[in-house]
Image (tube, rainbow, N blue to C red):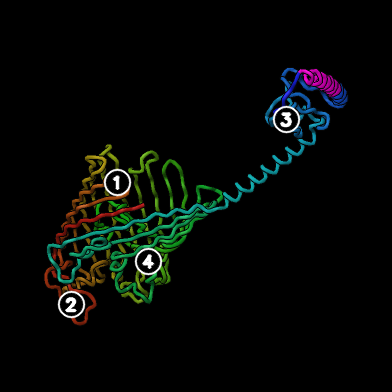
Amino acid sequence: MIRDVKTNSSDMGKRAGRIGSLLMTGALVLVSSELRAQTQDKGADSASAPTSTNSPQPPAAPPSSSSATPAPGETPSAPEAKSPAPDAKASDGKTASSAAEGGSDKPVAGSDEKKDEGDAKKEGEDDAKEEEKPLVTLHGTVELAYAYNFNNPSNGLNAWRWYDYRHNIVGLQNAMLTTEFEKGPVSGQVQLQLANFAEVFWDSGRGLEKDLLWRLLQQVSAKWTTPHEPLSIEGGAFNVPFGAEWNAAYLNWTWSSGNLFALMPYQVGGLRANYDVGRGWTVRAGVYNGWDQIATDNNRAKSMLLSLEWEKPDDEETYFFVNYMVGNERDPDDSRGPYARHTFDVYGQWHATESFFIRAQTFSGFEPTRGSTIDGWLGGALSVRVDPTSWLSLVGRGDFVRTFSGATGDNLFHADTLEMTGRNTNDSTLIGSATLTVDAHPASNVALRLEGRHDRADFPLFYKGNVERAADATEDTPNATNQTTITFGMTTWF
């Protein structure tokens, strides 16, 4: 601290003498320091290669803090040792730290190197811990809908529908939450589904005593990608193995699913191998319990599903899929015999122009029966989508399903309904539908849809007016050959 003092002429001479003494002492100290530094440099030169003098070097630190004389009014402080930047290069190609080896800075440089090594090791451990953490993502959807059936059925049901099954009810149609995980070569997902769709979908064959749990767990799967990366092994319960339509409205063009979706199995459980051929091609081969056999299997036989898939590499809206499934789906005591069912599913989509899309599907199959007869079906669907603007889509869809049976067979999908309405269980049937959907999507994760649909069959399949149930029956008796509905739905997703 500098003091404020008074001076006079006699004091000036004394102070001048003292200042001169201080300057002389400081000069002697500086000369002595320089001589010592030169002596050390000579010793270093004899032990190692000389450093370059092309770049300016910082002045040598005093050998002892006691030799340094502070300026008047400054507080003495210990000298601060400085080390060169780790990436600084000497003119001979060596780093500045290596050029300084053998000098007084060597211990400091060594401690810095150890510190750098410790920091690098710690960063490596942190990176390893970061890599060990699994990647977990959540996504889901919530669907609200109101559907009105102009047949005004007393039981409040729109027959042969899944998503818009309820008549004149505003409610939560579907709620789904999917958790996906990935850690190294292992990945998988767990999909939960609730609300009307899960409650009314299954018939009495899948009740509480069997697999009620699988009404909630819609898809659970795990996949291991082998060291040969194009090949992966996957197992679990898989959702909707056929067709372009899904169990969530936001993934579909229309609100209601078509008749082909109504025919196909909703879940299959088993194990499959996937192989990425490249250029958009994928091949899959799997072994499953059978159609909708998750917790149990209705027979000892297994089914095989083979798939060939292609997706245009630069446009996921253009694709082509071929599926073939074969296996015995009958109960052991079925009078038609233990013959395999052959199922063919072919569908594709073409992104024709920026705002015009076409989708087509055929879903067909057959299974032999005793007596040289065949039970089977043939189905087809065609959909067109036009996007007049970025927030509006117009969709039209038409579909049909023709079933056929031999003299000793049964209708694969409508035998119970035919019996309830007084017809032979092996009668052939024909059903079809026409759907028009207006889809507004004002935001990236919400869709508002208004949909009109007409269904028609050549036998009583739908409900109208006062619906009755036979005393010994567990289901209502269909009494109409057609129905027309209008549905408004909102779906959101994340």
Mark 2 touches mark 4? (CB < 8 Å): no
Of the image marks 2 and 4, the number of the one nearer the N terminus: 4
Residue 268 location in percent, x, y?
Answer: 39, 63
Query: Quarter of the image holding residue 472?
Result: bottom left
Mark 3: amino acid: Glu
In the displayed structure, 436 sits above or below 23; it is: below
Residue 430 location in percent, x, y?
Answer: 18, 61
Residue 1 seen in the current view = yes
For the record, the magenta segment spans 9-33
Q: Which residue is mark 2?
A: 469
Residue 45 seen in the current view = no
Q: Which residue is mark 3?
A: 74
Give the label, 1 or 3, closer to the camera: 3
Task: Answer with left or right where residue 81 lies relative to residue 367.
Answer: right
Of the image marks 4 and 3, the number of the one nearer the N terminus: 3
Give the label, 4 or 3, closer to the camera: 3
Sort mark 3 into few (<14), some (14-19) or many (20+) by Cα contacts within 10 Å: few
- How far apart in space, not on screen, are marks 4 and 3 (Cα)? 79 Å
Q: Which residue is mark 1?
A: 443
Query: Which disc number belongs to residue 216?
Result: 4
Mark 4 lies on a secondary structure that is: helix
In the displayed structure, 494 sits above or below 28; it is: below
